[in-house]
Amino acid sequence: MGFRTVIERFIAGNLTIIILCNRTDLDPEALALKTADLYLEFEAERISLSVSSDLQVSRAPSTSPAPPSPRTASSSSAFAGTASKT
């Protein structure tokens, strides 16, 4: 018994898919690609519905949050802790 993992990034679609399997009879790569197909097809339909009557594409406003700002050593120190061996 073991586990298999796949991480697929689709930069143009702003999409990352992570599949974690703890079964050997599943194909995580195929699951990730099927998931991407479903999501990207849904996004394409959503965008095509926002096409105005004069055929100019108007994208719906993004509801995703702004990306996090990069952490620096000084900003990460607030989250650092100490580990001790007991």
Image (cartoon, rainbow, N blue to C red):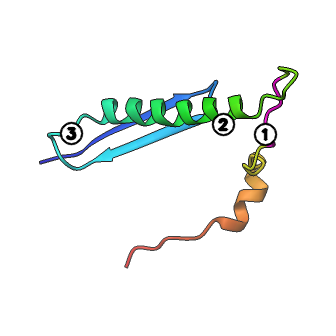
Q: Is residue 75 above or below residue 1?
A: below
Looking at the image, which is closer to me, 54 or 79?
54
Q: Quadrant of residue 10?
A: top right
On screen, residue 3 above or below 83: above
Q: Is residue 6 above or below residue 70?
A: above
Residue at the outermost front position? 53
The answer to whether 13 appears left or right of 56 in the picture is: left
- In the picture, measured across the screen, residue 71 lies left or right of residue 13, that is right
Q: Compared with residue 58, is residue 84 higher up or lower down, i.e. above or below? A: below
Between 47 and 78, the one lying in front of the other is 47
Q: Magenta region, mostly helix, strand or loop?
A: loop
Mark 3 secondary-structure assignment: loop
First to last magenta residue range: 57-61
**Quadrant that contains the C terminus:** bottom left
Mark 3 crowd level (few <14, some 14–19, many ≥20, 10 Å Cα): few
x%, y% of residue 64? 72, 49
Residue 51: assigned label: none
Q: Which residue is mark 1?
A: 60
Would residue 48 appear left or right of 82 to someone viewing this image?
Answer: right
Residue at 43% from the left image edge and 37% from the top image edge = 35
Q: Residue drawn 77% across and 44% down? A: 62
Picture coordinates of residue 1, whole percent (x, y): 11, 48
